[in-house]
Image (spheres, rainbow, N blue to C red):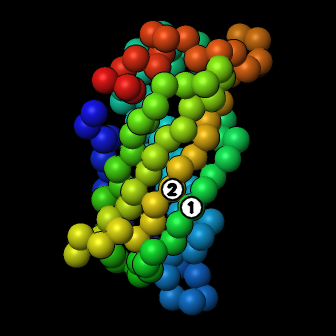
Amino acid sequence: MTPYTATITATPEDIDELGHVNNAVWVKWIQDVAVAHWYAVAAPEHSDAYMWVVTRHEIDYRGNVTAGETVTAETWVAEPPRGARFDRHMKFTGADGKVRVEAKTTWAIIERASGRLIRVPPEVAAPFLA
C-alpha cells in the first residue's frame, strides 16, 4: 500500500515558548492529513454519507521542528477495520530524513444521516487497504 503524503511547513503561529512546533499543533496536523486522505481516496458518495471522529491518539515525539522547517507527512491504514473503528498510522519526516513524530490514531465512522456509529462498510474500507 502506498501512503498518502502531504507537505507541511511550520509557521510562526505553530511555535510554542520552547521554540518548536507545539504538541497541540501536531495533533491538528494529524487530523488535517487524515481528513485530506479521506477526501482524496473515498468515493464522493462515501464522503457525503459518512464522517470520522478520533477516539484515540498515541503519539511519539522524536524530534523538534522550528518555524520555516518543512516536514513530509505520511499516513496509511495497515489493518482492516474492527466494527466501527480502524487504526491510522502517521509519520512526519524532516528534510534531513529523520522522523520527527510518529502516531497511531483510532478513528470511528459515523453515518451522517443518523449521527450514529456504524460498522465500517467493506466498500468504504477497501480503497484505504489497497
Q: What is the quadrant of residue 82 in the picture?
A: top right
Q: x, y (%) of residue 29?
A: 50, 56
Q: x, y (%) of residue 2?
A: 25, 37
Q: Earlier in the sequence, mark 2 or mark 1?
A: 1
Query: How packed is label 1: few (under 14 Cα within 10 Å), some, or many (20 or more)?
Result: some
Residue at 48% of width from left, 15% of height from top? 124
Residue 37: which disc?
none
Q: Nearer the viewer, residue 100 or 65?
A: 100
User: Which image quarter holds the C terminus?
Assistant: top left
Q: Is residue 88 above or below residue 103?
A: above
Please give the residue where the numbered disc 1 appears in the rendered image.
59
Q: What is the quadrant of residue 107 in the picture?
A: top right
Circle 1: element type: strand
| 94 displayed left or right of 79 | left
Q: What is the quadrant of residue 128 in the picture?
A: top left
Query: What distance separates the C-alpha of mark 2 from that of mark 1?
Result: 4 Å
| 80 displayed left or right of 58 | left
Please give the residue where the numbered disc 2 appears in the rendered image.
103
Residue at 71% of width from left, 10% of height from top? 113
Q: Nearer the viewer, residue 28 or 88?
A: 88
Q: Visible in this render: residue 8? A: no
Q: Please tell me how many numbered marks the rendered image carries.
A: 2
Q: Nearer the viewer, residue 15 or 65?
A: 65
Specify the amino acid type for callout 1: Ile
Residue at 61% of width from left, 40% of height from top? 106
**Mark 2–mark 1 CB contact (< 8 Å):** yes
Specify the amino acid type for callout 2: Ala
Q: Visible in this render: residue 26? A: yes
